[in-house]
Amino acid sequence: MSQLYLDDLSVGDTFESSEYEMTEDRITAFARDYDPQVFHTDPEAAQETFFGGLAASGWHTAAVTMRLMVESVPFANGTIGAGGDLRWPEPTRPGDRLRLLTWIEEIIPNRSKPGRARIVVQCRTLNQHDALKQEFRPNLMAWKRGVDPQA
């Protein structure tokens, strides 16, 4: 897919990613480094927790979502965030094959810097059963072709 500039984007545009499988090894390795809690690192001990079994860190689900977004919505100059709302309605589990559905909700031109805009997108991270694992509504930046992103 070619790089997407502001000129290429319209409200309602939709994008779908490929899948990413969340294995037990990936879940526990991420958690050991970034979210070392027993319900993310120890499948047996996780049985006795709120989650009733091994659950991926929400931050792991968010990191996978970012990977899928970069692959499926290739903004020219990079996927640059400017805040947003994030929620995890249910845990991601080993064996979940995550995919991302993204659509553009709003395009808000920057009044003081013509040639750039804030893009409000809705991102839904689903598993193979279409269960919603993460909902993310970020504000992203986009530039028109020929505009220097450092200007």
Image: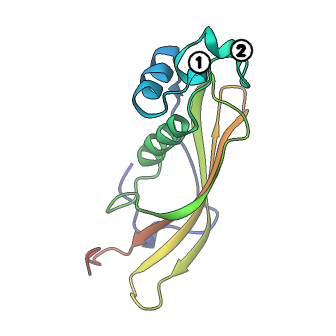
The 10 Å Cα crowd at callout 1, few under 14, some 14 to 19, many 20 or more, is some
Q: Quadrant of the C terminus?
A: bottom left
* Residue 47 versus residue 34 in the image, above or below: above
First in sequence: mark 2 vs mark 1: 2
* Residue 26 versus residue 33 in the image, above or below: above
Residue 48 in picture, x, y percent from top left: 71, 14
| Residue, far top | 44
What residue appears at the point 57 percent right and 27 percent down from the top-left corner?
Answer: 56
* Residue 3 versus residue 18 in the image, above or below: below
As drawn, is 115 to the left or to the right of 136?
left
Q: Provide the residue designation for mark 2.
A: 48
The 10 Å Cα crowd at callout 2, few under 14, some 14 to 19, many 20 or more, is few
Q: Secondary structure at mark 2?
A: helix
Residue 42 in picture, x, y percent from top left: 55, 14
- The figure's colour scheme reads rainbow
As drawn, is 144 to the left or to the right of 85?
left
* Residue 18 versus residue 95 in the image, above or below: below
Residue 105's tag is none
What residue appears at the point 47 percent right and 27 percent down from the top-left corner?
Answer: 31
82 or 50: nearer the viewer:
50
Q: Provide the residue designation for mark 1.
A: 94
Q: Label 2 is placed on what type of residue?
A: Glu
The CA span between labels 2 and 1 is 17 Å
Q: Label 1 is placed on what type of residue?
A: Pro
What residue appears at the point 68 percent right and 16 percent down from the top-left corner?
Answer: 53
Residue 133 in picture, x, y percent from top left: 67, 36
Q: How many marks?
A: 2
The image quarter containing residue 78 is bottom left
Q: Secondary structure at mark 1?
A: loop
Residue 95 in picture, x, y percent from top left: 59, 17
Mark 2 or 1: in front is 2
